[in-house]
Image: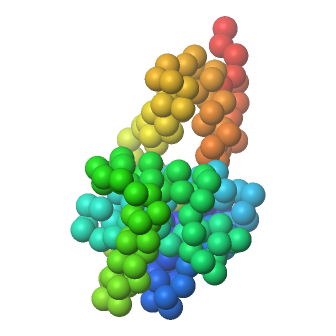
Amino acid sequence: MSLDINKTYGAILAAAREGRFVTYGELAAASGVAWKNAHRPLPQQLGRLVEIAHARGWPLLSAIVVNKDQVETGALEGDALEGFLAAAEMVGRQVDDPQAFVRAEQEAIFDWAKTAPKDLGLVEESAPQTSGPRFVQYFTPVLDALRANGGEAKPETVFAWIKEHIDVPTEVNRPGFGGGSHS
């Protein structure tokens, strides 16, 4: 089972309507995915939600997603803060004061949730691709891996980074498909 962006949205919306922060673990549970299987692909999905929210003129939804230690305060720190700010900057948002930016987005989300749409209106992204080449789904992770490695890397390094940060199906994770040895 994999993360469902519609269920992630639903969990964020439900928390926002209750005026509370939501944990990464709650988002994994909303899709019925164990944390050990969700912690790598979840940041990518939250980044996608930031893109969707920005395109629709909404606040950046992942601002209320926090580590379980900060669920009472709503503080974003460490990797959570860095990931949120990176996603915000990727959609063109200017961040001069990170903490003020986070707080403003959080307040906007709680206000927006009162009239927010019940669902995203998207086809479930976790459904298998039915047309087109399967490798297309790896474009974003490949670019992320290259960025993480200073703009260039050997294929083995890129594949290792992808395997470390997202769930790679067993049939992809075999020699000759991407990360294994090539003759």
Residue 20 on image: x %, y %? 54, 85
Vertical comparison of 45 with 131: above or below: below
Residue 178 on image: x %, y %? 60, 26
Residue 14 in view here: no
Residue placed most toward the observer, 180 or 156: 156
Q: Which of the image's four quarters has the N terminus?
A: bottom right
Vertical comparison of 82 with 66: above or below: above
Vertical comparison of 127 with 164: above or below: below
The residue under the point 75% across, 58% down is: 36
Q: Is residue 134 left or right of residue 88?
A: right
Tally of numbered discs: 0
Colour convention: rainbow
Residue 157 in view here: yes
The residue under the point 30% across, 52% down is: 94
Residue 12 on image: x %, y %? 50, 76
Q: Is residue 58 left or right of residue 127?
A: left
Q: Residue furthest top?
A: 183
Q: Which of the image's four quarters has the C terminus?
A: top right
The residue under the point 38% across, 41% down is: 132
The residue under the point 40% across, 57% down is: 97
Vertical comparison of 10 with 180: above or below: below
Residue 131 on image: x %, y %? 39, 46
Q: Is residue 3 left or right of residue 132?
A: right
